[in-house]
Amino acid sequence: MDEPIEMSLDPKDWSAFRRVAHEALNDALDFLETVRERPVWKPVPPEIRAQLLNEALPVDESPLETVYEQFRTRILPYATGNVHPRFFGWVHGAGQAGNIVAEMLAAAMNSNCGGRDHGAIYVEREVLGWCKQLFGFPSEASGLIVSGTSMANLVALGVARNARGPLRTSGVGQAADRLVAYTSVETHESIAKALEILGLGSCSLRKVPINRDATIDLSTLQQFIAEDKAAGLRPYCLIGCAGTVNTGAVDDLQELARISKTEDIWFHVDGAFGALCMLSEKLQHRLKGIEQADSLAFDFHKWAHVQYDAGCVLVRRADLHRAAYSMRPPYLQGLSRGLGAGQDWPCELGIELSRSFRALKIWFAFKEHGARKLGQLIERNCEQARYLAERVATKPELELLSPAYLNIVCFRVRAAGLDEKSLDQMNAEIVTDIQESGVAAPSTTRVHGRLAIRINITNHRTQFRDLDVLVNAVLKAFHSRLALRIPQLPDA
Ligand SMILES: *Cc1c(COP(=O)(O)O)cnc(C)c1O
């Protein structure tokens, strides 16, 4: 039977297609090359929002050129801003040019990395091998590239939970109702969310107070564990933070490892960004103990600047990892030869079956730049945070709320005559003013109950002078806000 050849999704005219594709690649590279000249962020204007939100499902085809033009004018100018050297909000990586190539090539291959025997599977295994080496995990340990640390925490805590009983078949119910996990009050919310998803409930997470330096208070932790045991509960998991999201504090991982051994409980480390300090010879001593973790979660898309999204979970005991997730129904059963061959399919180690070729961009990033340079950039960010903390300390209008443990500094403006509530409001407004000005993008958090201007530096493009620009922007916004307040004073 004659088939109409135009009934496929491939370009009818490859050379016309190529022209648009090359133009798009050029624009993408221009976008990165000139990032410093643009505002960090700008809001999506109402008319563009309307264009984006009000279009009905496209039923008819359009030339790629038209679609690309819409992307170029409606979407590209309104990026999050984290590629910019003065993006300091939350914990966002800055991405890199080489990953544009890697992502394009992964798209061309369009591999499904759930399993089977093909190149992408070996790339992922190689990347995982590098990670085991980096973190001092045994080569028999297992791991999985995932979307980010939220997913990595979930996968790891699922292994920790299932290691405590046949919960896969019985369901959580009574078998799990006495399990208790421990972590500091500063831990990331993805831990509680993981426990909710795992059916253990966030109330099964005991939040331990912190010391002055924002690390977990070890004696209270031990006291909690003893009390819980005496009450007939089953402590099963201890979660350490290697770099807390608020202030970048690193728990005493060595002591946590020791306690988890003594108490015979699982030791998980959330090292979303901080774990990559392992790449720096100067910083890696801060992570001592991480090599003893039963499981470790971290991101490549934060401090390794791999494009979103890319995280990783490592599990010391491969047998427990597989036991928690492996499922090979008949249509997924491996054969001894051919495409369907191979043991240890990634789908047996996590939640997703179909998976993208995330490992390729990580592989490109480590090969192109090398671990040494990535580590040096991390060191520089920590030096920049210390520089900022020093600058803040010299300004009478500014008050340091948390020092630079690693790469995060929290501070606020202060003024005589403003109570705590007005100060909170003032500092929040300053952060929004600066974001809207496009000069920089800080974010906010609370430190000791106070609203803080939070500066996180996970950015290979940031220069020391960018922090001077930031401090000046804060002071300028502060003085304009103060001037605005004057009319509110009683004029008798
Ligand atoms: C960012 C972060 C997470 C969550 O990671 P995602 O990659 O955003 O899912 C968890 N823990 C800490 C400490 C983080 O900084």
Image: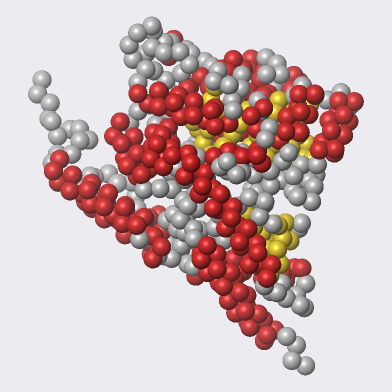
Q: Residue at x 32, y 11 (%)?
A: 338
Q: Position of residue 112 (x, y in %)?
A: 38, 26
Up-down relation of residue 466 to residue 184 (above or below): below
Q: Position of residue 94 (x, y in %)?
A: 46, 51
Residue placed furthest toward the bottom: 492
Q: Residue at x 67, y 51 (%)?
A: 405
Up-down relation of residue 235 to residue 417 (above or below): above
Up-down relation of residue 445 to residue 175 (above or below): below
Figure quadrant of the C terminus: bottom right
- Is 259 on the left-hand or right-hand side of 345? right
Q: Residue at x 61, y 74 (%)?
A: 475
* Quarter holding residue 356: top left
- Is 47 on the left-hand or right-hand side of 90? left
Number of marks present in the image shown: 0
Residue placed furthest toward the front: 281
* Quarter holding residue 196: top right
Residue placed furthest toward the left: 2
Task: Pick whichever, 241 or 353, lies toward us.
Answer: 241
In this picture the colour scheme is secondary structure
Would residue 321 be visible to someone looking at this image?
no
Would residue 226 be visible to someone looking at this image?
yes
Q: Position of residue 82 (x, y in %)?
A: 47, 54
Figure quadrant of the N terminus: top left
Q: Residue at x 18, y 39 (%)?
A: 11
Up-down relation of residue 343 to residue 372 (above or below): above
Q: Position of residue 78 (x, y in %)?
A: 41, 59
